[in-house]
Structures are given as structure tokens and as C-alpha cells.
Image: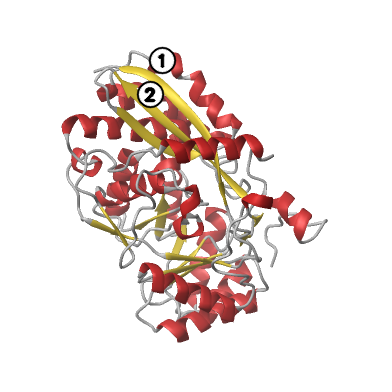
Amino acid sequence: MRITDLVVHSIAIADPPLRSSYGRHQPYALRTIIELKSDAGLTGIAETHGGDAIAQGFHSLRSQLIGADPYRLAGNFLPMIEADAQSTGFDRSQTYFVPGENPLDAAARLYSALEIAALDLIGKVAGKPVCDLLGGRARDEVPFSAYAFYKHAGGGGEGADAREDCYGEALTPEAIVRQVRQMIAKYGYKEVKLKAGVLEPDVEIETIKQLHAALGHNVPLRLDPNCAWSVETSVRIGKALAKELSHRGYLEDPTVNIEGMGQVRRKLLDDGVETPLASNVAVTSFADIPECVKNDAVQIILCDPHYWGGVQQVQHLGKICRTFGLGLSMHSNSHLGVSLMAMAHAAAATPHLTYACDTHYPWQSEEDEIVAGGRVPIVNGCVKIPAKPGLGVELDFDKLARGRERYANCKFRKRDDEAEMRKYVDPNWRRALPRW
């Protein structure tokens, strides 16, 4: 079997005005769908970050892909990410880049999509789900966490293409509690993560306290301010929320870099607070792990097959985390069903991934989904691995065409949350670390 064609689809999907320390989401999130066509008459698919730059990256690889053996594709292209996997420090860190816009993880994002599409194709040929190609699944259902955001009014999209605002404005603790209750009622989530670093720290402390009071101690809570706090503020908040985050919860990337995280960890332990620290910002490559372990800076790593170089790299990370006694969860960006299934297969094939995964999926609408048959079900907080080969989903080409048309008509070609803040909230706003 050989690859006969690579087809690249740049699409846009409506995205609500969610807030983080990076700023405010644009009305459209950009995604890329690729198809690897084969002479066997089957096609492998993948989804990744969007915009013109990554699409050009795929086109630059087209000549190397045509005629390639999909069974050897991952190995042949692995050198793309070997140098990236050994890089560390400021440039590699996601601290100062919005997700999907760091040029030094561009190769990993290209490679991961190619690997996932190749695995989807091979699974279809073999008649096996992707997770069963990689040593067999550790679980049939993959748990995900509710992902709560402070947000402005609006459901995403613009003008005649605007979406219904299903969750409403949420800029107070009470509104976040309503938002989370709504998500739990619809999707059955058993764990909750709050994106913080948006409002004054005392308001965010109160939000977690109200969530804890409303949901009970057996619902794990996570708090992620994306490095918005100083070491001192991080310690203050960690102490204030010691009880609320104590049941399988964690504090994620409260401050910048591994050194800062290590300081927060030591100061919290000195005060008797054992809340683990998690990261998808300070630890983004295998080269970060030795310093992370040496400084006891991060106790839970959030992987992501899109950033770490695919499903097999996530499996490898899982083994390393188990060796060093680190927990493993999974990061998310705004995405559709193809990415959700890739994430689910990665989690199913990684036994040590024992924390519920993040997902933005509830924030995207049925109208934008490009998976045939509609949105992937999340039931009791879980995505079930379907009894279908490959990723278990196919493309709806009518919906895909509408996504391409939306991309052509919208003005966005890269993510810029700062610009949205200056446009709608504060004309002088700039991301500042730490802000508090």
C-alpha cells in the first residue's frame, strides 16, 4: 500500500469569547483537516491546529509523502521532531505563545497529524481501532473533565454566522457554577477544571469555593491560570484552596517556568499543603522532564498528541511518567470530533493516563462538526472507543466544505487573543506575567 495523495483542508469553526490569561478567544478558531489517500482505496484522516502557516507546512511535505508506505510513515518522518524533543527553555515553552502559534513546536504538530492519519489508514486496512494497533487498549471508555471558562456573552461566529450562546456570560462565581451544572447535566462529567488567571485572585478563589460547595468533595476540581500569578500569589491561592483541591484535584501552571513552579511546590509543602502542581506550559518536551523531576516542580504532566508528536509519543511519555512517579492527564484546544477521537485513542492506549482529559468540545457547535453523523457522544463524562476501524470516524464532506468557506470568508489566519482583548475589553491590554 502506498500514499497517493495528501489533501489539506483549512477550516474555521465558531468559538465563543472565552477568557484566559492569554486574552479573549476570537470568534473563530482555525483548524486543519488532512486526508492521506492510498492506492488501497482507503483514506486516513487527522485534525490539528489551523491557519496558513501550518497548511503551508503540510504542502511542503507533499512530495515526500506521495508514494510513501504508510506503515513506515511515522518512522520516516520521526527526524522532524527529534531536535524539537531535545529543546527546552524559553523558546520551547508555551508560556509566551498562545497554543498553536509557537514556531518551535510546528514540526511536532505536522508530524503528529501525519502519524494519526497514517494510523487511521492502517487501522482501516487492518480492521482494527487505532488504540488496538498500539499494544491494545487499557480502557474502553476515556473520561473527560468539564472545562469551565469565564466568558463574555456570545456563542462565537460573526454576523449572520453567529451561534446561539448556550451558556451565557460567565464573569462571576455564581455564573461559573451555573455553567458547570449545565455541562454536567448534558455530558455527565465527574471532574471539573476552571480556566483562571482572568479575574482578581480573590474572585477566582471564591469561584472554586462555590464550585466545591455546590458539587461536593467527591468531584475533583482543577484550577489553571496559565502562569498569571507570581510565586507569592500562587502560594497564597494554593493555601486558600488546600481543602477544595485536595481530592484528586490540582493547581496547573500557576506561575512561570520550572524554577518558579518548584518554588511554589516547596513553599506549599512547607505549609503542609500537598496539592499537586500540573503543567502543559512549563513541561512541553521530553528534555524538560529531568529538571522537572530534579526540582519536584510538576507532579502531573498534561500531554497532548498534537504537541508531543502523536499518539506513540504520548505512550512513551506515559512510561516515563510512571517511572518517575508523575501523574498524566491531557491538554486540549478548541477542536472538533476528529481530534477528540485521536485524544481518546491516545488515552485508551496509555495505561498511565489516569487523570480525566481536558476537552473544549462542549464549546463547539453541531453546525461546525465535520464528522459524519454529527458530534461524538460524551456520556457519563466519557468517550467510548467505537467498534470501528481506525479512529472510528469519517468526514462529512458537505460540512467540511462549509468549514472551508467559513475559513475563506473570515479575516483570521492565526490566533491572537491579545487583539481581541484590545478590541472588546481594553484598548491598552497586553498580556503581563505575572499579572497578580
Judge by depth and name the residue closer to the eye, 388 or 233.
Answer: 388
- Vertical relation: 412 (above or below) 39: below
The residue under label 2 is 77
Distance from disc 2 to disc 1, alpha carbons, whole Å, reads: 9 Å
Residue 237 pos. (x, y %): 57, 75
User: In this rendering, does residue 331 appear at all?
Assistant: yes
Would you call the spot at circle 2 few (<14 residues within 10 Å), some (14-19), or many (20 or more)?
A: some
Residue 89 pos. (x, y %): 55, 43
Task: Tell me if label 2 and label 1 are in contact, CB under 8 Å.
Answer: yes
- Taking the spot 64% from the left edge, 62% from the top edge, the residue there is 154
Q: Is residue 353 left or right of residue 88?
A: left
Question: SS class of the residue under badge 2?
Answer: helix
The residue under label 1 is 64
Judge by depth and name the residue closer to the eye, 45 or 229.
Answer: 45
Would you call the spot at circle 1 few (<14 residues within 10 Å), some (14-19), or many (20 or more)?
A: few
Judge by depth and name the residue closer to the eye, 200 or 46.
Answer: 46
Question: SS class of the residue under badge 1?
Answer: helix
**Callout count:** 2
Residue 142 pos. (x, y %): 29, 57
Judge by depth and name the residue closer to the eye, 209 or 66.
Answer: 66
Residue 58 pos. (x, y %): 49, 25
Residue kind at label 2, given as amino acid type: Phe
Q: Is residue 133 left or right of residue 336?
A: left
Q: Nearer the viewer, mark 2 or mark 1?
A: 1
**Quadrant of residue 22 within the rendered picture:** bottom right
Residue kind at label 1, given as amino acid type: Gln
